Image: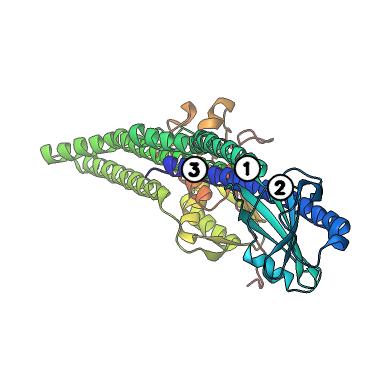
Amino acid sequence: MSLHRRLTFVSAGAVAVTVVGLALAAYLLVGGMLRDQVDDSLRGAAAITDDRIIERLPTRPPPIPREADRIRIPGPFLAARLITEDGEATRQFGGEVTFPTPAAAREIARQPEGTLRIIDAEGDDGRSLRLLMKSLGEGRAVVVARDTQEMDTLLDRLRWVLIGLGVAGVLAAGILGRVVSGTAMRPLERLRDAVDHVGRTGDLTRRVPEDGPAELRDVAVRFNRMLERLEASTNALDASARAQRRLVADASHELRTPIAVLRTNIEVLQAAPELAGGEREAMLGEVDEQLQELGGLVSDLIELARGDEPLPALDDVRLDELVAGEVAWARRHGTGVQFDVEAEPTVVDADSERLARAVRNLLDNAVKFSPPGGVVEVRVADGVISVRDHGRGIAVDDLPHVFDRFWRADGARDVPGSGLGLAIVRQTVEAHGGEVVVDGAVPGGGARFEIRLAGATAPTAVS
């Protein structure tokens, strides 16, 4: 059975049970009230009967009462009879109804004065009666009867009215249950449609309206959050795939030149073994240079390919010592360039190998664009590594592309390199939760790059 149908049956059943229960309670309540009214009238009649005839009771049963002996008792369809403990009627009052003397009345007559009991009985003509039996003491009792036909008729009408109302209530409950279940199911149906749409089309932009009851609204909110995460993950995967495809395409383009030059030089060396020594040495040197450039390009590509890999367990790294080591490497390879270094002892959580590669790329970039005899300023403090050169700076139009892969400014085409160094810097820094920024027009000339890492602390002991 579907949830929709179950909700319909449950809600309709609940309303139906409530309607039937209320109808039954109303019937019993009204019936009890009417019965209490009849009993009250019987008690009143019994009291009047006591006051009027108790002193007129004969010592022996009289003959059948004459009309003159009858005493009128107030109230509809009431009659009273005085009996002895043997069940003999000594006097009857009123005459609207006739009834046999019940055996219970003889028992009441033997009880102490004031003992009272009310029972249902049947008259001589078959009509329903309500009898009150009260002991008068000395083996005598009074029996007061009242016709309950009016009450029974009223209860019958009420019963049929309540049955009709109950049937109408059950039908209304069924309709109401279907409406309620439809209202309750509407958010679930929208959720089902959204899931089906996503499953059929793969469209993760679909959202479920966040309305309805609190529980279903919470389900819709959670489902939308799940879709948002899936959409973000899918977009990230798509972006990664596009980046990888672009990287492969760019790498293929960049690799063509050194490979073509290498092939040409090798073919020349193979075809002309009689080349003079100087020419042969120059060509071999060019081959070696191209091999180094190719090796650097492959190394950079491998580093970029690691961008999607999570960082290994991070260690406490002395940032000032790491930068000092990379500056020492740059001094050995940066002929004619001076380094001005100021570093405060600083500790960060990092992958020392990858962070060192990023710092080396920044230093290498500064060396490339520094004039002969220029100064590269290096500063380390509070998790910030600043590298400034005194070269020609970076044009405003070129700033948004500085960290793009394989991108080179028009004025930097003649500078050796693959165009991947700064892209590796940004990738590495962002993997560490930091950021890298550039100021392309520093007062006094040149450009300044800054690596900003979070969570820097001072070492507990400076060696």
Mark 3: secondary structure: helix
Badge 2: few (under 14), some or many (20 or more) residues near its Cα, within 10 Å? some
Residue 401: x and y in percent read 50, 32
Residue picked out by circle 1: 155
Residue picked out by circle 2: 34
**Residue nearer the viewer, 350 or 49:** 49
**Residue nearer the viewer, 111 or 313:** 111
Amino acid beneath label 1: Leu
Residue picked out by circle 3: 223
* Residue at 65% over, 60% down: 101
Residue 380: x and y in percent read 64, 55
**C-alpha distance separating marks 1 and 3:** 57 Å
Q: How is the image coloured?
A: rainbow
* Residue at 56% over, 51% down: 433
**Residue nearer the viewer, 393 or 279:** 393
Residue 65: x and y in percent read 74, 53
**Residue nearer the viewer, 44 or 349:** 44
Whether residue 422 is visible here, answered yes or no, is no
Q: Are marks 1 and 3 in contact (CB under 8 Å)?
A: no
